[in-house]
Amino acid sequence: MLVPARFLIAVFGLSVWINSGAYAQTGDEPNRESRTNPTVNSWRAQAISEQAAQTDNSRQAYKPDLSSAMKTVFADQKDIWTSPGRLRLSDTTWMVPLGGLTAGLFATDREFSASLSNNPADLRHFKRISNLSVATLAGTGAGLYLLSFPTHNAHWRETSLLAAESALNTMMTVEALKYSMGRDRPYEGNGNGRFFQGGVSFPSEHAAAAWSIASVFAHEYQGTLPRLMAYSMATAVSLSQVRSRQHFLSDVLIGSALGYFVGQGIYRRRHDPELGGGSWQSPHDFVSEGGMRSPSFMGSPYVPLESWIYPAMERLAALGYLKSASLGMRPWTRSEFVRLLTEAGELRADVEGSPEVDEIFKSLSDEFASDLIQLGGESNVHAQIESVYQGSTAISGRPLTDGFHFGQTIWNDYGRPLQEGFNNFAGASGWATAGPFVMYVRGEYQYAPSGQALPAAALNFISNVDDLPSNAPGLVPAATHHLQLLDAYVGMNLANWQISFGRQSLWWGPSEGGAMAYTDNAVPITMFRVNRIQPFRLQGFLSYLGDLRLDLFLGQLSGQEFINKSFTSVNDLGTYGQSLALQPYLSGARISFKFTPNLELNLAKTTIYGGPGNPLTPTTLLRSALGQHMNGEALGDGRSSLDFSYRVPGARNRLTAYGEAFTEDEVSPLSSPRKSAFQVGLYAPRMPKLNRLDLRLEGGSTSPIDFRTCNGCFYHNFQYVNGYTNDGQLMGTWIGRAAQGELIRSNYWLSGTKRVGFELRHRVIDRQFLPQGGTQNDAALTADIVSRAGFQFTGTLQYEQWLIPVLANGRQSNVTTSFQVSYWPHGRSN
């Protein structure tokens, strides 16, 4: 227990509180009859009116004697300890995330605390920071109280009184919990932080007191600078308590939350709105008075990446009908599509239209009609089957199935198994929402016949280039027939931040053939994800950054079989055909800057780390996020990317240029362009005199001329030798490792939901990477037809030739026909 800070808080609270009668004697307390006329939204006005009524009834507590002051404290304690009885089902919308975060911290408390420094000098340093921050908060409150008399400043006096009352009540509550929970401190016992052992670690008294005082200051003086200073002090106290190994992270989280809510309750009961300050709405009031019916608090499922909706919206954006769409960060939620569609509808009134634009807009409007009504204020309780589908792929000839080494005949297909012969899959998807919560499930049955064993030359190449053991077995791939979950997650939307957990697909980049950083080419990984589903804009000079979006995740890979023993404490590399018992993790962060309606810039970073010998801890997660993952360290395998898209303004037939840069183990491609891979593209949403025809040209290389020693390094790593793969499939661009590729794709839009097209693809594998190199050429006809009744028909006819001497003698060819029929029960429109 840090006695000096605790003593200071107690003295501040008691001295100010006992003498609080001076507030009542000055005659500064204003008339409260005008409190019930706030100029805010109706549901907020009601909350403030109720707060004012509570203030009228409780204001009598300020009396010039100790007895009345103690009665007020007793009443506060009664409200605090009986507050659980006032919880309602709707409170789960804020209690569930808090409880989930606390449970996660409980699980990692010991590991994180053990990873911190035990240096006595460091511990003393952080104790001093904690004490100094608490002293500053308490001293500021005491100073306001003393200075309020000569200045006759009733607002200062109220601030100090409420801060003192909050601090005293918080300390009384925390003391009772401390001795009831009996949790050991991090330095006691074996460091497990066990409960009911007689300790006093849970919750953190310092954090609780600091947040109770800081929260009162921040609401009495609501400017940016006072709030920043108050909450920075409270945060410094909380973090210092952890770094000084006085408390676990869960201790300070609950302590901080407790202090914040105690300060809120006292502020709402005692605060006089006429003195200044602002309203302070509790989470309970917010969820029970209609706040959760705001679109920014409604759960919404993500639209599948292969949906016809994305190319339709991208065409609208390219034609100038969208200003804030983040095309390089997908998937989008249905609520975000509604927002963008509303934006497009407003721009249609100012931009000269065309029949094809009207068709797309009508199709999208029909698709999201029910969502638009619901987001208008209806109760967000809904469940439905999204789709039921069946697809078949027949291949005559040997296909390419390994994008990590040789290439793929079919790509961006969720890692579905594929072999020569008849392949099949059938599945269904559905989702449900309830207020801010959303649940989505998509699963399917997958079948593929057995394949051909790799020749000895290919096995030797793989073991050499990936630093694997040389005893790779030449097994014949067995037939696949299994059930596979694709996207399946639960989530919660809080102020347009959707927090989700489960299997999820991502697409990070503007390229349509395959983004360099992340695609849906592999099975979705299980991840915890925080996504800003709608853009936001910073204030002041930072507004020049434009509309911003963020996407962050932490997930765990599957199917990784080897880790280089030189980077771990584990002696065994792994075993062919057997996944590691502890799979590595993949973290990612992406930020989008929509500087203007025509210019978008994205920065992204992913890191593979953890696995055998490299346990995941908050410390390694933080170090990895900061880029401390260079080869030679056991921390991880990092990649960074930068991409842009620019729509040429002015012309009737708009043209969008875009590009991606991608690098391995560097902070950014900009810092080392000679060690980076690049991919560029052009998209014309309609051709001259052929308004229904679009054209896309893409090309890139992952084998830089000035970085020949890379030898396929962009998706490989000497520590995580199975590379940037999940279940054996590459998660990046179809170009793959040490290759160059070009793509031509064009669609003729019969209507907003009907298009036919063709595609040409060419790829060359670098001879320095693959002995004798390799080539791949594809030509395909495609069709995607969505009927009014809700049926969707998707088909492809593709001819492929490839020449990879290591894999097969002579030139190989195959013909692929694929057909999928889907039914969307809620219907679509032409």
Image (spheres, helix red, strand yellow):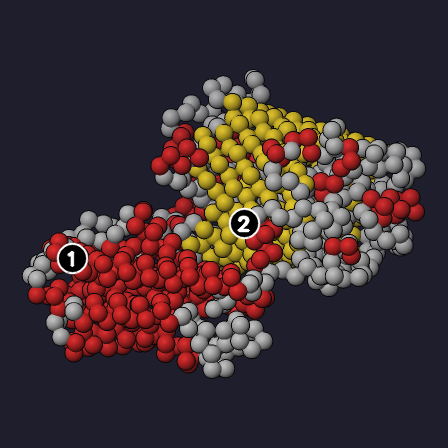
In which quadrant of the rendered view does residue 13 lie? bottom left
Quadrant in which residue 218 is drawn: bottom left
* Label 1 crowd bin: few (<14), some (14–19), many (20+), radius 10 Å: some
Residue closest to the eye, 787 or 660? 660
Three-letter amino acid code at the position of disc 1: Ser
Q: Position of residue 606 (x, y in %)?
A: 62, 46
Residue for badge 1? 148
Q: Looking at the rendering, in which quadrant would you find the N terminus?
A: bottom left
Q: In the image, what residue occupies the spot 50% across and 73% down?
A: 185
The part of the image, by quadrant, that contains residue 780 is top right
Residue 792 in view (yes/no): no
Identity, as a three-letter code, of the amino acid under mark 2? Leu
Front residue of 63 and 776: 63
Residue 345, x across and y down, in percent: 40, 34
Q: Residue 530: x, y in percent?
A: 51, 52
Instruction: Identify the residue at the far front of this view.
Output: 121
First reached walking from the N terminus: tag 1 or tag 2: 1
Q: Residue at x 51, y 33 (%)?
A: 600
Secondary structure under the numbered disc 1 in the rendered image: helix
Kindly identify which residue carries mark 2: 552
